[in-house]
Amino acid sequence: MNNNPIGVYDSGFGGLSVWRELYRALPEESIIYLGDGKNCPYGSLSEEKIRSLAVKSVEELLARGCKMIVVACNTATAAAIKHLRATFPDIPIVGLEPAVKPACQRTRSGVVGVIATERSLKSEKFLATLAKYGQGVNVIKSVGQGFVEAVERNAENSPQTEEIVREVVEPIVSQGADMLVLGCTHYPFLRDVIAKVIGERNVEIIDSGEAVEKRVESLLEEYDLRAEQGHRAEYEFVSFADGDYVQRLRCKAFAE
Ligand code: DGL
């Protein structure tokens, strides 16, 4: 038993899509969410830079007493997870990666779309996953250009956002994809507009949120880290950006 918080980290707002899954499924667990904010977007930064930002963020969360870390960012996971596990060997660290495996297993058309950041799509980790599960499947990889920025601006519902989403999603769907993998934690916030662009066409949109929640749950059991029954959870939001950003993180987490 351990009532300390779980630490969740992302470059900005995106990891809140994972935070929401944990909040719903594990109501007795306190969570500290760190949305860097100052260095977002990570998608085109060097691996080295992302690694050092990830170490700084995990140090911050550990200094606040976190018992487990969730790197709720595909880009930071691809660039830094090995390094983080080697640097902090005593703490369970959960990473995220695009749901390529279930998409390639479930596709009937044999065409799968994966949208993610440039850094994620180029990473060794992603290419290895693709080589393992993508055989015989036409996997169309696209960068969600401008998606992260739209979510950071809270502009999910603007006509301009619909345009940038259409530019990326339409070519994937036109090529016959029946699975669309959201390989960045910011993208689930664009789910409605993505669904609008897809329209009546039969395309399943998948992200990694639920799978990560299940993984967190099983590690809490394995390490005997669950909070006590009836524990009153607390939710804290921190950032390397200013107080206004922290306020926006909190609002977005509890929106809907
Ligand atoms: N949310 C992040 C991800 O899952 C990264 C977005 C960014 O900062 O570029 O990849």
Image (cartoon, helix red, strand yellow):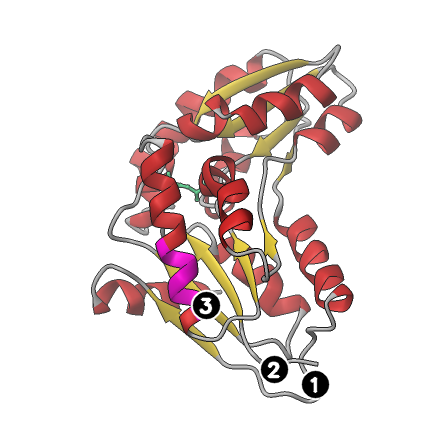
The residue under label 1 is 228
Mark 3 and mark 1: Cα distance apart in space: 20 Å
Amino acid type at mark 1:
Glu
Ligand 1 resides in the quarter of the picture at top left
Mark 2 and mark 1: Cα distance apart in space: 6 Å
Percent from the top left, x then y, of residue 33?
A: 44, 65
Q: Are marks 2 and 1 in contact (CB under 8 Å)?
A: yes
Q: Does residue 61 belong to the magenta stretch?
A: yes
Q: Is residue 66 above or below residue 178?
A: below
Secondary structure, mark 1, is loop
Which of the 4 quarters of the picture holds residue 232? bottom right
Question: Position of 112 compared to 190: left or right?
Answer: right
Image quarter hosting the N terminus: bottom right
- Which mark sits nearer the N-terminus, 2 or 1? 2
Please, what is the dominant secondary structure of the magenta stretch?
helix
Q: State whether residue 251 appears in this view.
A: no
Percent from the top left, x then y, of residue 69?
A: 54, 60
**Residue at the location (34% across, 67% down)?**
238
Amino acid type at mark 2:
Asn
The part of the chain drawn in magenta is 56-62
The residue under label 3 is 62
Percent from the top left, x then y, of residue 176?
A: 64, 14
- Per the rendering, the mark at residue 27 is none
